[in-house]
Amino acid sequence: MNHKCAAIFLVLGLLPSGIFTGCKSPPPPPSPSSTRRDTIPVREARPAPLPPPEFPIRPVTRDLLELIGKSAYELGDLQYFISSAITLERSKGMQYDIELTNGEGLIQEINAREQIIIPKHTGGVLIPESSTGGASASGAPRVLKICFDDVDEHTLTFRENPSDKRFYLAFREDRNYGEFTEYGDETCRVNFNGEIPYIYVRLEEVIDDRPRIRELSGRFVSPRIFPEDIFQGL
């Protein structure tokens, strides 16, 4: 048998084996080594229980603060409420996580952001040590730091508006990126619909015009002591 016949038999021998075994499909392309996932944890403030409806809503103004300051109430003892809902969004920077399964790894690149929702009528408290700055001549503060969170440092700033003397949420506007406000020592993007949120309290004003009755017992002349009486007693 010459070399040509050997080559023919070799090819014929390999061809049936290829038919019976079949052709394996190529493996799938490897998945990318890293994936990026944007997760936005949402945290919603817990609304405080509303007071009885017979106590009317009173927007916080400087005149009201001065009136409260002159009475038996303290500013820190009042329950403050926000007039409309706001959403705060803050970034916590890039975070990386790796998952290992069967010897293969997956790197997750997470753009850590957080949304904080403060619903309408959510109750907050005044942080007194942060609200003393910028007081007016009469002593009432022009800036109030209100905390709706369980961390005292997470406060929102409400500033007096000279036109109507209400205390509105303080924020700054960026033409390209929207509105931003300070949430404690962090800067957050803020979203709200409609009017700018302001704070209010629940106070009932009662007029008491009852007369104060005081009955007099009279005044009488005291006994007069003469000089000779004094000498007789010596």
Image (cartoon, rainbow, N blue to C red):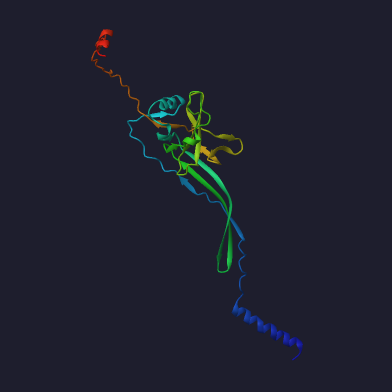
Percent across and percent down for residue 151 are 47, 44
- Residue sitting nearer the eye, 41 or 155: 155
Point out the residue furthest to the front here. Answer: 234
> Which residue is nearer to you in this view: 29 or 136?
136
x%, y% of residue 102?
55, 69
Residue 171 position in % (x across, y down):
55, 34
Q: Answer left or right for 116 relative to 57.
A: right
* Above or below, 147 relative to 142: below
Q: Is residue 140 left or right of residue 71?
A: right
- Return the residue nearer the eye: 19 or 37: 37
Whether residue 192 appears in this view of the structure is no
Name the residue located 28 percent from the left edge and 8 percent from the top edge: 227
For the C terminus, the quadrant is: top left
Quarter of the figure that contains the N terminus: bottom right
Residue at the (71%, 84%) spot, across then down: 8
95 versus 221 height, above or below: below
Kindly tell me whether residue 64 is visible in this rendering.
yes
| Residue 39: percent from left, percent from top | 53, 51
